[in-house]
Image: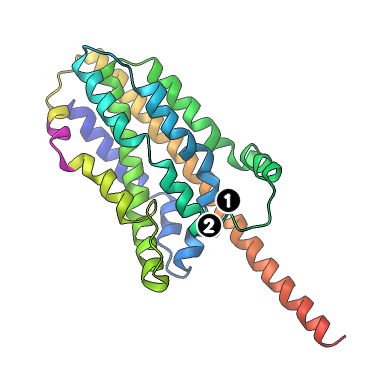
Amino acid sequence: MKATLRHILKLKKEYSRLPFFDFLRDETLSARQRLEFYPCMAPFIMSFGDLNCYVMRLEPTLDVYQAMVNEHSYEDDHHWPWYLEDFSKLGFDRQQISPTEYLQFFYSDRTAVNRLLSHKLAHLIYGSSSIVRLAIIEAIEETGNVLFELVRKLAQSIEEETGMELRYCGEFHFSKESGHAITNEHAIMAEIEMDEQTRAEAIEKVNLVFAWFTEWTEELLAYAKQNLNYSYEQLIGDAKNETEICFA
């Protein structure tokens, strides 16, 4: 597994340079503006718990590697309530949108990549051995670590400005995610023996994970930019209307 883990870290380094992450680093925008992508990822985040509960996890099992997969699934299947908590704190559920309009949004073209990502990952996991599942999970974890390392800083900035703690975006969630790596899990995985066929399959599927998450970041970035442009145009429109009222 060592070669596969090295390959994952190589892909993670390339992944961290994507335009979406440059957007999250853009200090010409406020921390809140850089979180404008947040509603777009709801379909994936809300389905990620199901992915852990009903796809990754297989119980009972006598397979030691599947047992590792199961243990990991219990760590990640309950993060979605924190996402909803921050969704509310960031003001996204105070907008005047009906449940029907939210459903139209969640099933629109703007969030298609987010909706399909869980389905693609499920297909990948269902067809994999327990050892390859571990590699897939590790790839998913590393994509998440890139995102949450940056978002954590934005949450910290918001908390310093407002006193509002963001648990999903902030240190609370990040410590849970990075805690996986602090354990001896990586050391154990590195010692797993893989034959050439299994290694080739793992590399192929890890490549797919990073390719799909790259598409995911592209959708998040497009959503954020469109919403920021809309907010700016709306602000200009409101100012224009106020001026017209004043001089009417």
Q: SS of the residue at dot 1?
A: helix
Q: Which is nearer the N-term, disc 1 or disc 2?
A: 2
- 223 or 57, nearer to the observer: 57
The answer to whether the residue labelled 1 contacts the one labelled 2, judged by CB atoms less than 8 Å apart, is yes
Q: Is residue 139 left or right of residue 166?
A: left
| Quarter of the view holding residue 53 | top left
Disc 1 versus disc 2: nearer the observer: 2
Q: SS of the residue at dot 2?
A: loop
Number of other residues with Cα within 10 Å of mark 1, as a class: few under 14, some 14 to 19, many 20 or more: many
Q: Mark 2 points at which residue?
A: 36
Q: Residue furthest right?
A: 248
**Magenta region, residue range:** 182-187
Q: How far apart are marks 1 and 2 (CA)?
A: 8 Å
Name the spot of residue 187 as percent of width and height, x first.
12, 33
Name the residue rendered at 45%, 58% in the picture: 23
Number of other residues with Cα within 10 Å of mark 2, as a class: few under 14, some 14 to 19, many 20 or more: some
Name the spot of residue 130 as percent of width and height, x first.
27, 17
- Tag shown at residue 223: 1
Q: How many labels does the image show?
A: 2
